[in-house]
Image (spheres, rainbow, N blue to C red):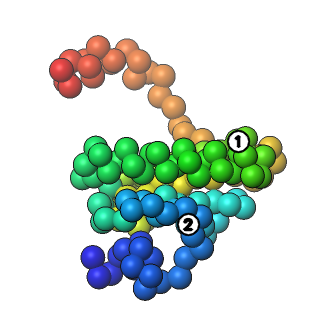
Amino acid sequence: MNTCIFCKIVKGEANSWKIYENEDVYAFLDIHPAARYHTLVIPKKHYTNIFDIPEKELQAVIAAVKKVSKLYEEKLGIKNIQIISNSGAEAQQEVFHLHFHIVPRKRGDGQNLRWVTHSEWVNDFDNMIEKIQ
């Protein structure tokens, strides 16, 4: 992946502000932060999104998300975070290397992630379940 910015970061070919690293995972501050300590956690190997990462590698990434979150709680007293991952362009994925955002949150921070909900779809739950069984 010669053009993937996250692959370049892992290889040391692009700047980053490392928070955590192990043999499988790299965590660094987001260059476009929504909050102080907004962090991205990525697998070192290139996987486009949740659909193509093997389970073992995904477990390593999620374990690192937990480790960084606990680090922020213990060292900074951060007790409110959002963990977000988008898979696919229509899901607002912009960098096509799987990544999880850890976004510290506090009341009045100006961030407001809200979904438009559709309670009318509850009536279709049985049909929805049937399609995946």
Q: Position of residue 36 (x, y in %)?
A: 72, 61
In which image quadrant can residue 59 be found? top left
Q: Position of residue 75 (x, y in %)?
A: 75, 52
Total tally of numbered discs in the picture: 2
Left or right of residue 68: residue 118: left
Rounded to the nearest whole Å, what is the CA distance between mark 2 and mark 1? 19 Å
Of the pair 5 and 34, the residue shown nearer to us? 5
Name the residue rendered at 52%, 49% in the picture.
65
Q: Which residue is mark 1?
A: 80
Residue found 37% across the figure and 74% down from its top: 7
Q: Position of residue 24 (x, y in %)?
A: 37, 59
Q: Is residue 133 left or right of residue 13?
A: left
Question: In the image shown, does 43 or 3 lie closer to the viewer?
Answer: 43
Front-most of residues 101 and 10: 10
Q: Amino acid at mark 1?
A: Asn
Amino acid under label 2?
A: Phe
Q: Earlier in the sequence, mark 2 or mark 1?
A: 2
Tell me if residue 72 comes above or below residue 26 in the rendering.
above
Query: Element at badge 2?
Result: strand
Report the disc number at residue 28: 2
Left or right: 121 in relation to 39: left
Which image quarter is the N terminus in?
bottom left
x then y, percent, for residue 56: 29, 46
Q: Quarter of the image containing the C terminus? A: top left
Q: Is residue 131 above or below residue 55?
A: above
Q: Could you tell me if the residues under marks 2 and 1 are in contact, i.e. CB atoms within 8 Å?
A: no
- Circle 1 sits in a helix, a strand or a loop, which is it? loop
The answer to whether residue 65 is seen in the rendering is yes
